[in-house]
Image (spheres, rainbow, N blue to C red):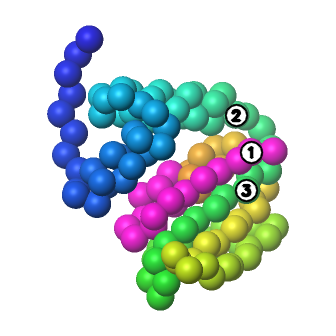
Amino acid sequence: MGIISVSMGQGMEGELEKAKKVLGVKSRSKIIRLAIGALLRESASFEELSGHQSAVFTVVYPHDKKPAELEEMLHEYSALLKLHAHSHSSKGCAEVLVVEGDAKIIREILGQLRKMRGVKSVNCAVT
């Protein structure tokens, strides 16, 4: 098995330790392998998508720190946007987007959302 070195901030390291305990995983290496495996499976399923698709995106970011790129993206893809909802919680803000369009565009949007600075998490479900 190969060895890969990963740098992460203390906050993420602490979250990794918490997840390790909650999930009952014994080592950091194992939990990182599990996370990478999940990402690779997700990537493969998105790569296989073709034709017209509907996708639901959930984007979470800190209060009062909505990324400017998100607003720009919403405007850019407004013709494909079927629903846009915003919600506040005690831990931040969430945007829910329902988008209909070609699979290539769905992948583009997912990539753009994941690259945005300040975004805590992005989830996507294709229906």
Mark 2 crowdedness (10 Å alpha carbons): few <14, some 14-19, many ≥20 = some
Residue ranking furthest to the bottom: 64
Residue visible at 62% across and 82% down in the picture: 88
Lower sequence index among marks 3 and 1: 3
Q: Foreground: 50 or 10? A: 10
In the rendered image, residue 69, in percent from the top left (x then y), is placed at 47, 74
Residue visible at 81% across and 45% down in the picture: 127
The residue under label 3 is which amino acid type? Val
Mark 3 crowdedness (10 Å alpha carbons): few <14, some 14-19, many ≥20 = some
From the image, tell me which residue sits under label 2.
49
Q: Foreground: 106 or 91? A: 91
* Helix, strand or loop status at disc 2: loop
| Up/down of 82 relative to 44, above or below | below
Can see residue 55? yes
| Cα distance between the residues tagged 1 and 2 | 9 Å
The residue under label 2 is which amino acid type? Leu
| Up/down of 10 relative to 5, above or below | below
From the image, tell me which residue sits under label 1.
126
Task: Please give the count of numbered marks on the rendered protein.
Answer: 3
From the image, tell me which residue sits under label 3.
56
Left or right relative to 24: residue 9: left
Q: Which residues are magenta?
A: 111-127
Residue visible at 63% across and 30% down in the picture: 45
| Cα distance between the residues tagged 2 and 3 | 15 Å
